[in-house]
Amino acid sequence: MDVDFQTIHCKEFDQKCLLVKLSDGSSKTFSFNVKTMAFEPMCCSDCAPTQMDSDLTPRHTEWCPHTRNTVVFAYNHVLKMELKYRFDCESGSFHEIECKECHLNPAKRTDPKQIVLVATSPKSKRAIVLTMSKKERVQKMQYDEKEKKYVDMEPTPIKSLTLRSVVVQEKETEDVTQFLEDLDLNGKKDEEEAQVMESDLIAMYKEKSRVLPNEIILVAKNRHTGEFGTYVFDRYIHQFLHVNLPDIKIDSERRQIPLQQCIVLTMSSKTQEGINLQHKPGQEGVQKYMYNRQLGIFEAMKETFVIQKATDIDKWIKKVFEECPCYTRKVHGIVDFLRNVKPYMIDQTGVQQKKPEVQLTGLPYSFNLTNPYEPSETATKEEAIPSGITSTSGVSVETDFSEDTDNSEDSSASSSSDTETDDSDSFEIISSEELTQSKE
């Protein structure tokens, strides 16, 4: 892994320290301890790394009629933000600009082999070509007349408008707010800590399944645990569902989807707007964008967690009916998909399994208790009894055995008279006591 080293002066501790910049844009600060003769980590909020043009990942370029400059939309790995820049030909450095009319278009991607921008230095009159390095960072090249080829230029600091202290302050405020929201007053463990976020998924490849033939199955790896899984994106909920499909075998050696490539382009069944699923700018992790018709651009959607429990599907089905009181063909398709995917959710905890038929034992004949509201494949209309008891030997028994012997005898007598009048009837309804005596 490539790293950069910088020596800076820490104003807080009034000493020199070593700033180590990692390839992902993060940085660590160390101070040298003379007694132990070793470097020790420092915690200093003022020692922010200098923003260099090599910290930018270009997204795409656009001509801005308001500032009359070619705007380079880029991801700043130091600030962890999407910002706008213009390239200054005289200084050979990037300047951050502000324009409320120009917006990032996530659908546009700069290919790593594509030239980002071509400019000419007014002093040397030599061409400057901006490309992308292997790490997808800005790489400046200038034509050398002696060597008759383009050579790399040294990275230069960015003239920035957004300060690191502002970003750190906003991040600290978000952390405090999130901490208060996640505070469990009952002392219970917060289940959300174990939830998988969309940014935790590294898209590997796409598959098709016979179980869900109309859906694109995404095979992704959890960047924290390293585990592979299959996921399907719900176009109404706008969240990923973690599923376990029997006909998909995960190939951990299969090639990963390139960072600059679109993963899935689909349409929301809730808003009828386009949704673009792709990796986060310059790094791994899934990011969602929804098309804004008024602005004509794709805007980043709020990150959500991955649904894993089958019981959550029932909650969403109920919510769909609450939001869509009219049962239309569209609602039928949404609910039908949720019902079809529920048995394949990765977490089936709390799902009620179908109870097996109850076998009555200790009786002269065998009987099965069935649900009268569920049709049986083996029972016929003549065999079905409203009480829910089905005879397997041709003899029917009442479920409500009366304690009154006289009533039982009267019922038996009336049944006997009916039997005498109809010779074709081979059944005789008797009480349980008489049934036991007859067997003895």
Image (cartoon, grey):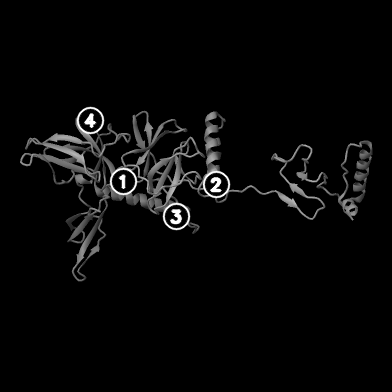
Instruction: Residue 335 in the image: state x and y as whole percent.
Output: 54, 36
**Label drawn at residue 183:** 3
Real-space Cα separation, disc 4 to disc 3, in angstroms: 47 Å
Instruction: Residue 381 in the image: state x and y as whole percent.
Output: 77, 37
Question: In this orientation, does residue 92 appear?
Answer: no
For disc 4, the marked residue is: 63
Instruction: Residue 302 in the image: state x and y as whole percent.
Output: 39, 41
249 sits to left or right of 150: right
Real-space Cα separation, disc 1 to disc 4, in angstroms: 26 Å
Residue at horizontal 52 percent and vertical 45 percent from the top: 344
For marks 2 and 3 on the same chain, the one whose residue lies earlier in the sequence? 3
For disc 2, the marked residue is: 311
Real-space Cα separation, disc 1 to disc 2, in angstroms: 33 Å
Q: Which of marks 1 and 2 is in front?
A: 1
Q: Give the amino acid at mark 4.
A: Trp
User: Helix, strand, or loop for circle 4?
Assistant: strand
Q: Give the amino acid at mark 2.
A: Thr
Q: Which of marks 2 and 3 is in front?
A: 2
For disc 1, the marked residue is: 283
For marks 2 and 4 on the same chain, the one whose residue lies earlier in the sequence? 4
Residues at marks 1 and 4 touching, judged by CB atoms closer than 8 Å: no
User: Helix, strand, or loop for circle 2?
Assistant: helix
Q: Give the amino acid at mark 1.
A: Gln
For marks 1 and 2 on the same chain, the one whose residue lies earlier in the sequence? 1
| Location of the C terminus (image quadrant) | bottom right
Q: In this view, does 222 lie above or below 384?
A: below
Q: Give the amino acid at mark 3.
A: Leu
Residues at marks 3 and 1 touching, judged by CB atoms closer than 8 Å: no
| Location of the N terminus (image quadrant) | bottom left
